[in-house]
Amino acid sequence: MAASSLSRPARAVLLSSRYISLPLRPSDQALHYLRSLNNRLRQPVGLTSVRQASHQAQGRANGPKNGPGKRLGAKKTGEQFVVPGNIIYRQRGTLWFPGENCAMGRDHTIYATEKGYVKYYRDPFKHPKRRYIGVALERDWSLPTPKDAPRRRRLGMIPVRINEDSSHLTDNYVPRPSPIAGLDENSVLPEGMSLEPSGKGGHLRPTFTLKDGTLLKMRSNYMFREDNWQIGRAAERARTRVRPFKKGNRWLAWRKRTAKRARIAEMKSVNKKGKAKKKATPRS
């Protein structure tokens, strides 16, 4: 009789201790062999290899690379003139948030949606800690705009004086500054301003001289700014001396490291004090 044709109760009786204690017959030896083989097949097979879920999780052969930078940071400074589509700030994450007349791209790039002047500001009514970048339609305007302020129309029009009577104007009225285009040598210029040829088409470009002798020139974005080579020599004019770096000066490295740790500890203590004040006291 084959062992596979036996029922479970019969196999249990054959494999009991009473039959095992007796001398094994040829049929019993076959059943014992089949039982050991069955137990061996029931044992789980151990895993000999592990396959990662992705290629990146398996590790890299040569380690991380030091590739070129992504040119992040501010592309337009405060009070600088922008047009729709101009990139103001490139970032990874949300260090700055889009404010009025601005939007954020899919790579967190903040760009202008209206023509105006860049403003960096905070709005505690929206969020107590977030920093915003907005565009003001006029240079003299400030952001954020109060909630109770009248709405400003965006029709691209300029105020035109109809009569000399200014009784209808309010104290908060700010006229649009007159454009500088069309000036000639006979024009009356403000104090400290002069005209010089721009070198492109023979047009005259306004320049402004400060009291300390700094020469500011009007750029293509209608802003007065120094030349790049003059900005680069600001440290020389201030007589700033930089100590040359010595690779083996461990005493200087220790002092810088200690000062940095002290600043970090001070900032952490200030943040902890601020969080402790914000915790609400339990009601009695």
Image (cartoon, helix red, strand yellow):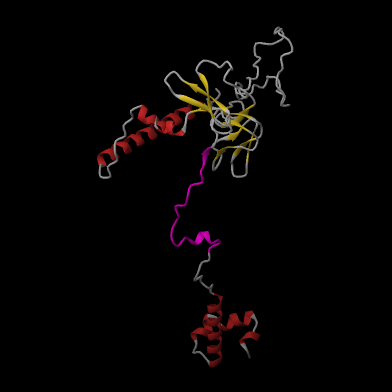
Of the pair 100 and 30, the residue shown nearer to us: 100
Q: Which residues are magenta?
A: 52-74
Q: Position of residue 61 (x, y in %)?
A: 45, 62
Position of the N terminus by quadrant: bottom right
Specify whether residue 217 is painted magenta. Answer: no
Q: Is residue 23 left or right of residue 136?
A: left
Q: Position of residue 99 (x, y in %)?
A: 62, 31
Quarter of the image for residue 2 reads bottom right
Give the residue drawn at x 74%, y 13%.
Answer: 162
Position of the C terminus by quadrant: top right
Return the residue found at the far bottom: 26
Quarter of the image for residue 83 reads top right
Of the pair 54 and 252, the residue shown nearer to us: 252
Taken as a whole, is the magenta stretch helix, strand or loop? loop
Query: How many labels, in total?
Result: 0
Q: Is residue 63 left or right of residue 129?
A: left
Of the pair 147 and 90, the residue shown nearer to us: 90
Give the residue drawn at x 72%, y 17%.
Answer: 160
Specify whether residue 67 is painted magenta. Answer: yes
Q: Is residue 204 left or right of residue 263?
A: right
Quarter of the image for residue 164 reads top right
- Above or below: residue 46 compared with residue 223: below
Q: Position of residue 85 (x, y in %)?
A: 64, 38
Of the pair 41 and 128, the residue shown nearer to us: 128
Q: Is residue 111 left or right of residue 159?
A: left
Q: Position of residue 138 (x, y in %)?
A: 63, 24
Give the residue drawn at x 51%, y 70%.
Answer: 47
